[in-house]
Image (spheres, helix red, strand yellow):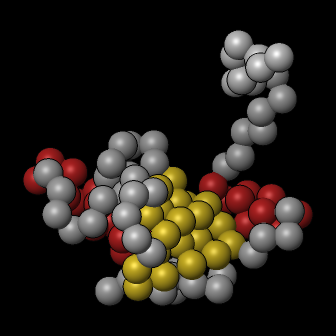
Amino acid sequence: MKPSNPFLEITLDDNHNLRFKDSRAFLLHLGIRGEIIHTSGHTDDSISLILDEGIAFTGDLPGSTWGEDSMHQVETSWQRIRALNAKTIYPGHGPVRPLE
């Protein structure tokens, strides 16, 4: 019989609160070399995962064409990503692309 609700309930009792400054050590414990950084622009609480091999998972961080109100935040976020030597972007929407 197919379950009527295939989704699992999300509970907060076993969440791990991770500070950005601790993300590298946390990820390394999982076998991942990289860090999680704050990349506001789409929303104030957006994050990106930047791997040491030059790959960035940017979620919904928009490109250079975005509303004027958040343009400074978006550009600051892209500067943070570039500073960590990201070369390839895996956005939440759209194709994988090189960082220009």
Residue 29 in the image, given as x and y percentages of width and height: 88, 63
Q: Nearer the viewer, residue 25 or 8?
A: 8
The structure residue drawn at horizontal position 21% and vertical position 51%, both measured from the top left corner, is 70
> Looking at the rendering, in which quadrant would you find the C terminus?
bottom left
Taking 43 as reference, is 9 above or below it? above
The residue lying at 81 percent from left, 22 percent from top is 13
At x 37% / y 64%, what residue is drawn?
A: 94
62 versus 31 height, above or below: above
Residue in the image at 16% along x and 63% along y:
65
For residue 68, say whether it is visible. yes
Q: Nearer the viewer, residue 65 or 7?
A: 7
- Tell me the quarter of the image containing the N terminus: top right
65 in relation to 81, above or below: above
Question: Which of the 4 image quarters holds residue 28?
Answer: bottom right
Q: Percent from the top left, x then y, of residue 82?
A: 43, 80
Say if residue 38 shows up in the picture.
no
**Dividing the picture into quarters, in which one does residue 96 lie?**
bottom left
Side of 41 relative to 21 (left or right): left
Q: Nearer the viewer, residue 89 or 29?
A: 89
